[in-house]
Amino acid sequence: WFSGTPWEDCESYYEFLHDRHSPTAEYVCLKLKGFYLKGAQVASTRDDLLPRQYLDFCKRFQDEVPSELADRATLERTICDSLGIASVDEVFESIDDTPIGAASIGVVHKA
């Protein structure tokens, strides 16, 4: 705002701006992935680093990053390629389709 504006007035305006723009920052982190998700995760470990509106989504990124594995076939292909096997049945009796956790570099499924 302007020099001489009471802090209370500035603070309420900053809160308005953070409420308005934090969803955009969250969207950008999710779209750009990698470095940006990891940066948000690191920032979430310090409650004194960012305003609450940003910390809220950064803390969610610790274990709730949406997965790109859209279907069972993609999940199985990823596992097979990673482990160098022909079928997930060679290693696992069962694999839950729903992830139990996700972060910037991976997704966790119960198997």
Image (cartoon, rainbow, N blue to C red):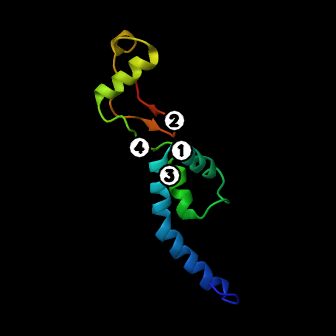
Q: Earlier in the sequence, mark 4 or mark 2?
A: 4
Q: Which residue is mark 2?
A: 105
Q: CA distance from mark 4 to mark 3?
A: 12 Å
Inspect the image, locate mark 2, and give the three-letter code of the amino acid beneath it. Ile
Residue count near mark 3 (Cα–Cα under 10 Å), binned few <14, some 14–19, many ≥20: many
Label annotation for residue 29: 3
Residue count near mark 1 (Cα–Cα under 10 Å), binned few <14, some 14–19, many ≥20: some
Q: Which residue is mark 4?
A: 66
Q: CA distance from mark 4 to mark 2?
A: 11 Å
Q: Which residue is at the front of the view, 57 or 78?
A: 78
Residue sitting at the far right: 4
Q: Which residue is at the front of the view, 87 or 59?
A: 87
Q: Which residue is mark 1?
A: 62
Q: Earlier in the sequence, mark 1 or mark 3?
A: 3
Identity of the residue drawn at 46% across and 44% down:
64
Q: Which residue is at the front of the view, 95 or 73?
A: 73
Q: Relative to residue 61, is residue 90 drawn left or right?
A: left
Q: Earlier in the sequence, mark 1 or mark 2?
A: 1
Q: Position of residue 76 (x, y in %)?
A: 34, 22
Identity of the residue drawn at 40% across and 21% down:
79
Residue count near mark 2 (Cα–Cα under 10 Å), binned few <14, some 14–19, many ≥20: few
Inspect the image, locate mark 4, and give the three-letter code of the amino acid beneath it. Pro
